[in-house]
Amino acid sequence: MFGPSPKALHPMAGQPRVVFLNNLNTNPHIEIGDYTYYDDPEDPNNFFRNVLYHFDFIGDRLIIGRFCAIAQHVRFVMNGANHDTEGLSTYPFFAFGNGWGNSIPPSLASPKPGSRLDTVVGNDVWIGYDATIMPGRTIGDGAIIGAKSVVTQDVEPYSIVAGNPAKCIRKRFSDDTISRLLTLAWWNWPAEQITQQLEHIISGNIDALEKVAHGTTDCADRSPLNEE
Ligand SMILES: CC(C)(COP(=O)(O)OP(=O)(O)OC[C@H]1O[C@@H](n2cnc3c(N)ncnc32)[C@H](O)[C@@H]1OP(=O)(O)O)[C@@H](O)C(=O)NCCC(=O)NCCS
């Protein structure tokens, strides 16, 4: 056995509150990697209500990697949330039609390059309860987002951020270890290989993982994570 099937909607026995999100996704503007789960005791199958102001005509995408853990009430605010702020009024007259339909603000009609960026969450990211991710942010692999945080800036891989606005509390590992983890990208390994190396993944034995990746597995190696 090599872990749950990524095609299982409720992969955790006896816990219908947990869903593998890619099995719920039908939106072509959303991509979610295998094993990424959402935990919600109230309404887990309705995760996409948490992706706010995500309108097809804007075209921005929400991309979430593999093996992410997303807690209840995490929200992704997409670019459609932002009214034009360059005119004299932020009121969206055009949306109401009836003679106002042509009054599309220039910033919406011809958006500046980079003004409607995709929201990108890497792999192995843990997003805590009730956190909010603002439009167009990138959260790096291995990051942790604290409960009730508001992410207004990009988050570096393997950093822990918290608060409103979310600030870096600390990096999880040394820069050298982070670089090695990003190179290993164990989350892209086949399920069989991940299963075989789980002991090292959960204990932090990066030397052993690197040996596996390089095809020189030494099963006797149980050295702890090499931190500077
Ligand atoms: C972010 C988190 C992982 C940090 O845990 P930790 O490494 O043990 O951090 P600490 O508790 O030592 O706190 C470190 C600092 O960050 C602050 N902090 C921690 N979590 C915070 C949060 N969510 N919002 C604001 N500040 C936070 C602490 O007040 C502390 O500040 P200080 O240094 O000024 O005293 C944890 O606090 C958290 O939010 N976990 C998410 C839990 C959750 O939502 N789970 C959902 C089910 S999966």
Image (cartoon, rainbow, N blue to C red):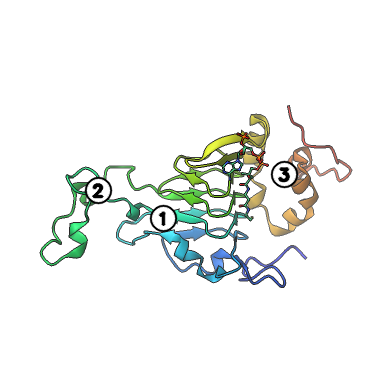
Instruction: Residue under label 1, please give it.
Output: 61
Point out the tag, 3 or 1, that comes first from the N-terminus: 1
Q: Quadrant of the image for the N terminus?
A: bottom right
Residue occupying image coordinates x 45% and y 39%:
153
Q: Position of residue 59 (x, y in %)?
A: 34, 56
Instruction: Residue under label 2, please give it.
Output: 84
Residue occupying image coordinates x 45% and y 45%:
137
Q: Position of residue 188 (x, y in %)?
A: 63, 52
Q: Amino acid at mark 3?
A: Ala
Q: Amino acid at mark 2?
A: Asp
Q: Amino acid at mark 1?
A: Arg
Cα gap from disc 3 to disc 1, whole angstroms: 32 Å
Instruction: Residue under label 3, please give it.
Output: 213
Relative to 164, does residue 14 appear above or below in the rendering?
Answer: below
Cα gap from disc 2 to disc 3, whole angstroms: 49 Å
Point out the tag, 1 or 2, that comes first from the N-terminus: 1
Disc 3 vs disc 1: Cβ atoms closer than 8 Å? no
Q: Is residue 123 left or right of residue 174?
A: left
